[in-house]
Image (cartoon, helix red, strand yellow):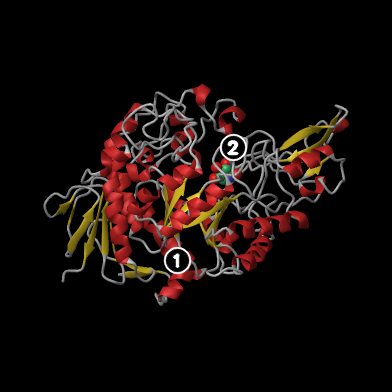
Amino acid sequence: MTKEGGVDAVDASPANRAHDWWRQAVVYQIYPRSFADANGDGLGDLPGITSRVDYLQQLGIDAVWLSPFYPSALADGGYDVDDYRDVDPRLGTLTDFDSMVTALHTAGIRVIVDIVPNHSSNRHRWFRDAIASPPGSPERARYIFREGRGPNGALPPSDWPSHFAPSAWTRTSNPDGSLGQWYLHLFAPEQPDFNWDNREVQLDFLTTLRFWADRGVDGFRIDVAHALKKDLTEPFRSRPKLTDMVNPLAGNDELFDRDDVHEIYREWRQVFNEYSPPRMAVAEAWVEPARRPLYARADELGQAFNFDLLESEWDAAEYRAIITDNLTMARDAETSSTWVLSNHDVVRHPSRYGLRSGTDLKKWLLGDGAIPPVDRAMGLRRARAATMLILALPGSTYLYQGEELGLFEVSDIPHDRIQDPVWTRMSGAEKGRDGCRVPLPWTPERPAFGFSPVDAHLPQPDWFAELSVQTQDSMAGSTLDLYRRALALRRQWQSTETLEWQHTTNNRVLHFVRPNGFASVTTFNRTTYSLPSGRVLLSSGALDGSRIPPNTTVWLAPET
Ligand code: NOJ
């Protein structure tokens, strides 16, 4: 038996638990525009969230993370922020925000908000000031403006591509109509990158962090945390491709995961620690796994998303390696690992797991007829087993709204309804992420399945009816029922942050025990397995007498 994991001597006293509440929390991600619509305009809003606090409490989560709800033209689903210290009027007001926080806190649910520091929107006051000011002005120095190359500066300053291709540079026009400088945007042109060497930018974000912390926010999710610092020495290094996951220049890459980005987070930590308990933060950093703990250091953000399972197959060996590596990395960085199967950027996991292994998801979304359709029964079975597996692990789990209903990706959104900028920027070569952002079904009825009294801002499919909250609410064995039971049991499981792998007679079975004796057993594809000793607490699918069928997770308590 091998022992994996983190801190053996976690102080479980109430005071310390308040301090370290995030270490083993279950955090539920809300995509506010698609959660619940209280004012009846087809777009989710903050009062909608407040109206569903009972649902969240019954689900049994510890915290919510809200994707951006700030004023925005929605060029990138709200990750294009016009004003970091306000609420989009379509989603409510600051007073609505305060009411929502009070309601969540009263229900024992903490609140994490999204901070988007790499770029603002092009409607942000500072960017409008920059466009209205001459080259070399302090207004332009808050962003990254440069002259173009070639005759009349007609070529972009470098060959850097944007995530929403092709170029990361867009040319501006001068007030007299002539063409002017270029500005950098690693994402859409509506998302100009800030210049993080500029002290005004640095200080303004400290103000934003304090603004939300003062309003009672418990933590922050930091968008593209690895991108803020760039090597802007000229001539620029050539970089015709973006390779998110690879960092060939270890800490010295021109655009991502540079060593100097960490100075920013050390300063932020001082702000987090002004509060009691200190505010938590989690980095969204798509970096090489071994570099992830750098963002999670105690004097920086404290935690970082582990996206390895988003990219892995449903495979025992892959799962075991990912779990082992991440528990070790988290322990070495004195943090806890995070586990994520779905979020607002990826194909929902019941669909991923219902497609043949190795399927190109982008092609599948485009409706490539050569790809066999999702096997929904199989996908959901594996998804339920995977969720129970990760909920049994040490560390915190991030759930994405709708996964508790077993929602699949909505893959057939008509082209003229697509909102994701990826679709137009890639000239239809990628469909983007709308399929996981379709508003939730609360009831089985049209027009919007209880999400709104009018049609939702993204079209909802007919099959949402059978997966609605109301349909599953009192149905024993529904996915919603499974999540509720699993989260309630997990609260009782809370244990030191380690696990012990148990020997299995089949390498397509993962079996581990937590220090308090609670065990989790998962069978993967084409595998049945004898129930080990113990009292069955919960199973992700029906058992076959004393055999665990394929693609099933079972939780066991020690025999008393
Ligand atoms: C990561 C966010 O999760 C994604 O939705 C967004 O498009 C980019 N960052 C840019 O902000």
Q: Is mark 1 within 8 Å of ligand 1?
A: no
Please state which amino acid type lies under the numbered disc 1.
Answer: Trp
Along the line of sight, which residue is nearer the eye, 78 or 215? 215
Q: CA distance from mark 1 to mark 2?
A: 31 Å
Say above or below: 429 vs 106.
above
Q: Which residue is mark 1?
A: 21
Please state which amino acid type lies under the numbered disc 2.
Answer: Asp
What percent of the width, then of the height, locates residue 347? 44, 39
Quadrant that contains the C terminus: bottom left
What percent of the width, then of the height, locates residue 10? 42, 75
- Residue 49, by quadrant, is top left
Residue at the image position 36 percent from the left and 61 percent from the top: 393
Earlier-in-chain disc, 1 versus 2 = 1
Res. 7 visible in picture:
no
- Numbered disc in front, either 1 or 2: 1
Res. 141 visible in picture:
yes
Give neighbour class at mark 2: few <14, some 14-19, many 20+ (Cα, 10 Å): some
Give neighbour class at mark 1: few <14, some 14-19, many 20+ (Cα, 10 Å): some
Q: Which residue is mark 2?
A: 76
* Quarter of the rendered image showing ligand 1: top right
User: Helix, strand, or loop for circle 2?
Assistant: loop
Along the line of sight, which residue is nearer the eye, 412 or 427? 412
- Residue 448, by quadrant, is top left
What percent of the width, then of the height, locates residue 443? 32, 35
- Residue 460, by quadrant, is top left
Q: Is mark 2 within 8 Å of ligand 1?
A: yes
